[in-house]
Image (spheres, rainbow, N blue to C red):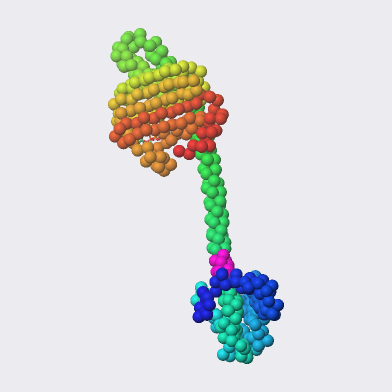
Amino acid sequence: MLKSDQTQFTRHENINLMSFPSDFKDNYAASPRRRPRVFRKLRERVKELTVLHKASRLFQKAPQKLRQTLRRLVNILPAGWQYPEIASAQIRYGNSVFSTDNFKETPWKQIVEFSTRNGKQGSIQIAYLEERPPEKEGPFLSEERALLNSLAHMLQSHIEQRIYQLLLRKNNASLEKKVAERTRQLTRLNQELTREAARSERGELRLKAFRNKLRKLLARTTKQEEQQRRTIAANLHDTIGQALAAMKMKLLSLHGEAIFYGLEQEIDDIRTLLEKTIKSTRSLTSEISSPIIYELELSSSIPWLIEKFSDKHHIQVSFNTAGDLTKISEQIRLTVFRGCRELLNNVARHAKASKISVTLLRDREKLFLKVEDNGLGFSVNEWKRKVLREDSFGLFNVREQILELGGTLDIESVPGSGTSVIATLSLQEKGKAANDKKNSDCR
Ligand SMILES: Nc1ncnc2c1ncn2[C@@H]1O[C@H](COP(=O)(O)OP(=O)(O)OP(=O)(O)O)[C@@H](O)[C@H]1O
Ligand SMILES: [Mg+2]
C-alpha cells in the first residue's frame, strides 16, 4: 500500500516508463536541433530501466536476510536519477534504516511511503545533495516519481512475499510436527493393537487346545464308564443272576419235602422273594448297561428307552420318527442314545412336565434328535454362565460329545415355557466336519 502524497504507482505509469517518448520518432526525424534533447531523454529512460532491472534481479535472487537485500537495494537507487553524482538514498523499514554512504537530509528530496500487511511502515527517499533546476516535482522528473513508486511497490511485494513464505514455512513446520506426532501415536497404537491381537490370538489358541483336550478327556471318560457299566452288568448277570437262578432251581427241588414238613407256605414266600430279586437284578443289569444299546438300531433302542422311562416316571412320552435309521455308526448311535437318556432324565428331574415329545429324523446326511417338554423351562444364558462353576454336568457332557462328532446342540428354553433341545449330527465321515466344528465352536 503506497502512501505517497505524490503520484500513486499504477500499471499504466510503469508501461509509460518502459516505452520510448511518444514524440521521439517525429522529433528525431523533423528537427536535428532537437536530437540532443531526445537522446538525453532516452539516456534517462535507460538509466531508470537499468535500476528497475537491477532491483528486480535483486528481488528474484534475494539473499536470505531482508536487511542484506535492503542494503544492496539502497546502493542501486541513485544511478536511476537524473543527477546520480549528487544523489543519495535511504530506505526505512520498521525500525531499520539503510542509507547510501553520502546520504543527507536536504530540501531536494523525493519520498514514497509504503506499509506491509504485517503492519510495518516503510519508505524510500532520494535526496540530491545540491540544488538543481526545477522539473515536474522540485528538481525531479515525473518519470523519476513513477520509478520511485514502482520500486516501492516492488519492495512492498517482495517483503510481503517473504512474510508469506515465512508463515508458510512455519505452518509447514508445525504441520510436519503434528503429522510426525500423529504418526508416532498411530505407530504406537498399531504396535499395541498388534501385540494385543497376538496376545488374544495366543489366548484363543490356548482355549481351543484346552477345549479339544477336554472333549477328548470326556470321550475317554465316557468310554471308560461304558466299559465299566458293561463289566458290572456282565458280573451281575453272570454271578448274582446265575446264583439266584440256581437258588430258585434248588428251592423248586425242595418243594416235595417242604410239603412233607408242612413248610409249603414258607417255601412259596421264599420263591416269590427270589423271583422278585431275580427280576430286579435283571432290571438293574439292563439299567446299568443293556446289550440293547449296542446291538439294536436306534429305531428300536430309543423306543425301548422311552418305554422304560415312561414306566419309571409316569410321564407321557410320544415318539416320532422318519427316515432310514439303519447303518448308523456305533459311535453316533451311542452318543444319541446317551444324549436322549440324559435329556429325558433332565425333564424328570427339573421340568415338572406332563408331556414329552421325542423326534428322531434322518435325511441323507444328517440325523436330528429333538426332545421337547412342556415343563418349567430354564434360562439357557444363565446355564451357559454357570456351566463351568456348578456341578451340573449332564447337558454340558451331551453337548461336548455331539460337538466332538462335528454336530451341534441347540437349546431353546424360557423359564415357564418348556424346553426344546435339538441335536444335529452329520452322518458323513467324522473327519472334516468335526475338525471344522472343533476349531470354530466356542459356544
Ligand atoms: N428340561 C429341563 N427343564 C427345566 N430345566 C432344565 C431342563 N434341562 C436342564 N435344566 C436345567 O439345566 C441345568 C443343567 O442341567 P444338567 O443336566 O447339566 O445338570 P443336572 O441335571 O442338574 O445335573 P447332572 O450333572 O446330574 O446332569 C439343570 O440343573 C436344570 O436347572
Ligand atoms: Mg442332568
Q: Quadrant of ligand 1?
A: top left
Res 58 visible: no
Res 161 visible: yes
Number of residue marks: 0
Residue positioned 39% across, 10% down in the render: 253
Residue positioned 51% across, 33% down in the render: 437
Q: Where does the image place residue 79, in percent across and percent down from the top left?
A: 67, 81
Using residue 267 as the reference point, say whether residue 332 is left or right of it.
Answer: right
Q: Quadrant of residue 97?
A: bottom right
Q: Nearer the viewer, residue 410 or 356?
A: 410
Q: Quadrant of residue 13?
A: bottom right
Q: Please tell me whether residue 231 is drawn above or below residue 3 in the rendered image.
A: above
Using residue 110 as the reference point, say whether residue 419 is left or right of it.
Answer: left
Is residue 432 found inside the magenta-colored segment of the image?
A: no
Is residue 172 found inside the magenta-colored segment of the image?
A: yes
Using residue 174 as the reference point, say whether residue 87 is left or right of it.
Answer: right
Residue positioned 46% across, 23% down in the render: 367
Q: Please tell me whether residue 199 is drawn above or below residue 99 in the rendered image.
A: above
Instruction: Work out which residue is located at the far front of the displayed protein and give it.
Output: 30
Q: Where does the image place residue 151, in percent across and percent down from the top left?
A: 60, 76
Q: Nearer the viewer, residue 359 or 257?
A: 359
Image: magenta residue range: 161-173
Residue positioned 29% across, 34% down in the render: 416
* Quadrant the C terminus occupies: top left
Q: Nearer the viewer, residue 334 or 63?
A: 63
Q: Where does the image place residue 423, in percent across and percent down from the top left?
A: 43, 28
**Dominant secondary-structure state across the stretch colored magenta:** helix
Q: Nearer the viewer, residue 411 or 356?
A: 411
Q: Where does the image place residue 255, in percent across and percent down from the top left?
A: 35, 10
